[in-house]
Amino acid sequence: MSDESILDMQTIDQLKELVDDDDPDFFVDIIQGYIETAGVSIKELSEAVNSQDIEKVASAAHCLKGSSGNIGAVRMQKISYELEKFGKKDNLTGASELLTNLEEEFSKVTVVLEKEI
Amino acid sequence: MKILIAEDDLISRKVLAKTLKQLDYEVLTAVDGLEAWNIIQAESPNIALLDWMMPKMDGLEVIKKIRENTYDHYIFILLLTAKTDKDDIIKGIETGADDYLTKPFNRGELLARLRAGQRIIELEKSLASKNAKLSEVNQSLANINVRMKKDLDLAAEIQTSLLPHDLPQIENVNIEWFLKACDELAGDILNVFKLDETHLGFYLLDVSGHGVGAALLSVTLSRILSPLTNESSILRKKVSGNGAFNISPPAEVAEKLNNQFLMEDESGQYFTLIYGVLDLETSKYTFISAGHPNFILFRKDNTHIAFQDAGLPIGFLPDAKYKELSVQLQPGDRLYFYSDGINEAMDPENEQFGHDRLIETFESLQNQHLKSCLESTIEKVHNWSHNKVVDDMSILAIELT
C-alpha cells in the first residue's frame, strides 16, 4: 500500500502552503496536534467501545472524522465515519473490528506524517 | 472584515483560522457554541463560520440567537457541516444561515462562498448608509418644514394684524367684513378707515395668485393704502398750515398705484382693486373699480344695482386711466364688495356659486342685521363648496342706517 492512499498529498501540500513568516511552525504544529488529538480520540473510542457507550463512540468518531479529513487521512476519515454511524444504531456489533482497523491505520498515518515534518 | 470561526475540532479550527488570516481577515475563534455566542455579542463579527455540532451550544442554536438580535450591520452566517443530509442543510438555512459548507472543506469553495457573503455584506452596508443618509435628509426636511411653517404662521399673524380689527365708529354707518385665506397667507386684503372727520375710505383688493407671493404684495399694498397719522400718503395730502388733509380722488389713487406696481415680466403680478370714498355729510360714494368683479348696492326697497364697470387691473398697462363713478347713497343702503373667491366658489360638480346666487342670497337676508347677513352668506358659500377653499375669500359690507 502506497503512502498516497494513506494520506492525500494534495491536502498535505495545501497545509504546507499555509506556512508563512508569521507562523513558520504552522504545519508542524498541525501535524503534531493531529497526532496528539487523534491519539486521545482513539483512546476515548476504545474506552467507549469497551464500556458499550454508543453515544460516546459516535461523538469521538465524529471528532476524529473531522480532523482526519483536514489533514487528508482519508482512510481514517472513512473508518471514523463508519464508527460515527453507530450513533444511530442500538448496539456496537462490529465496532471493535473497526476500532482495530482504525488503530492500525493510525500507526501508518503517524509514520507517514512524521516523515513529512 | 471580522470573521468568527466556531469549531470544536482543533485541527479544523487551526486550518480555517490560518487560511482566513492569510486572506487578511481579522480572525476570532471559539471552541464551542457558548463561547461563539459570547464573542458575537462582544465583537459583532461580519461573518460567522459556525460548526453544526459543537459542545455547550450547537450551531443551530447560535444561529437562532444571532437572528433574534439586532446589530448595526448584517452578520453573514456560513454553516459548517459534516452532514450531507439535505434536510439538515435546509433546516440550517431556514434557521438563518446564509450558506453552508461541508467538511472537510475545499479551499476554493470556502473562498467563493466567503466572497459571496462579502458581496451581501457590502450591499447591506451601502443600503444602510443610504438609509441613514435618507433619514438624515428627511430629518432636515422636517426641520426646514417646521421653520417654514413657523415663518408662515408669523407672516399670517402680521397680515392678520393689518386687517381692520378696530373699525371706525361712525354714527349711521355699519361695517362688517370677512376674509379667509386659502393657504396660510392671503392675496386678498381689505380695509376701512377715516380719511378725515367727514370721509370714510375703504377698499378690497385681490392680488393675482395666492400664497406667499401674493401675500407679500397684499401686505405692501395694505401699508401703502393707509391714511398715515399726520403724514401725507397716497390717499390724502397734508395741507400746509392748518393740519387738514386734501383727500386724493380714487382715480388718482388707482393711477398712482398702477404706475408704482406695473406688472413686471418675471413676477407677472397684478391686482384688482375697488377703492372708494364715502362722504359722510352728503352720503355720496365715489369709487373706482380696477378689474374687480362687481359690487352690489342693495336698497331698502329691495332693489339692487350691480356695478360692473370694471377697468383694467392695477399693474396691467402703463399709464392706464381709471374712471371714477359716484352714487348717491340713502339710509338703508347696503354695499357689498367681494373677491372672486366668493362668487367663483365651486361645488363638487365644478359649478360656480355665481353672482346671481350671491345677489339672491343678499336679497333673502336683507332684513337681517348686517353681521348675521354676512355670516349666513359665508356659510352658504362654504356649504356650496363643501368647505373646500381654493381661492382667498373676502367680503366687505357697508350699511347706511
Image (tube, rainbow, N blue to C red):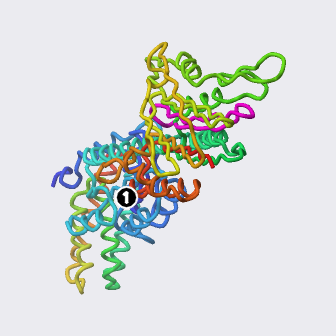
**Residue hosting label 1:** A35
Q: Residue furthest right?
A: B241
* Chain of the residue under the numbered disc 1 shown in the image: A
**Depth check: B285 or B68 in front?**
B285
Up/down of B180 relative to B323, above or below: below
| Residue B37 percent across, percent down from the top left | 48, 63
- 10 Å neighbourhood of mark 1: few (<14), some, or many (≥20)? many
Residue at (35%, 78%) from the top-left corner? Answer: A56
Which of the two residues, A66 or B301, is positioned nearer the viewer here?
B301
Looking at the rendering, the stretch of residues picked out in magenta corresponds to B188-211
The image shows residue B254 at horizontal and vertical percentages of 55, 22
- Farthest top residue in view: B319
Q: Is residue B287 left or right of residue B14?
A: right
Q: Position of residue B377 (x, y in %)?
A: 48, 54
- Residue depicted at 61% across the width and 28% down the height: B220
Q: Residue at x 68, y 45 (%)?
A: B165
Q: Is residue B395 left or right of residue A18?
A: right
Magenta residues, dominant SS class? strand
SS label for mark 1: helix
* In-front residue for pair B370/A27: B370
Direction from residue B345 to residue B43 in the image, left or right: right
Tell me if residue A92 can be seen.
Answer: yes
- The kind of residue on which mark 1 rests is Ile
> How far from the left and from the top, in percent, is residue B39?
51, 58
Task: Let me know if residue A29 appears in the view.
Answer: no
Residue at figure coordinates x 82%, y 23% from the top left? B243
Is residue B185 found left or right of B239 in the rendered image? left
- In the image, residue B178 sits, relative to residue B8, either above or below, namely above
- Determine if the magenta segment contains residue A45: no
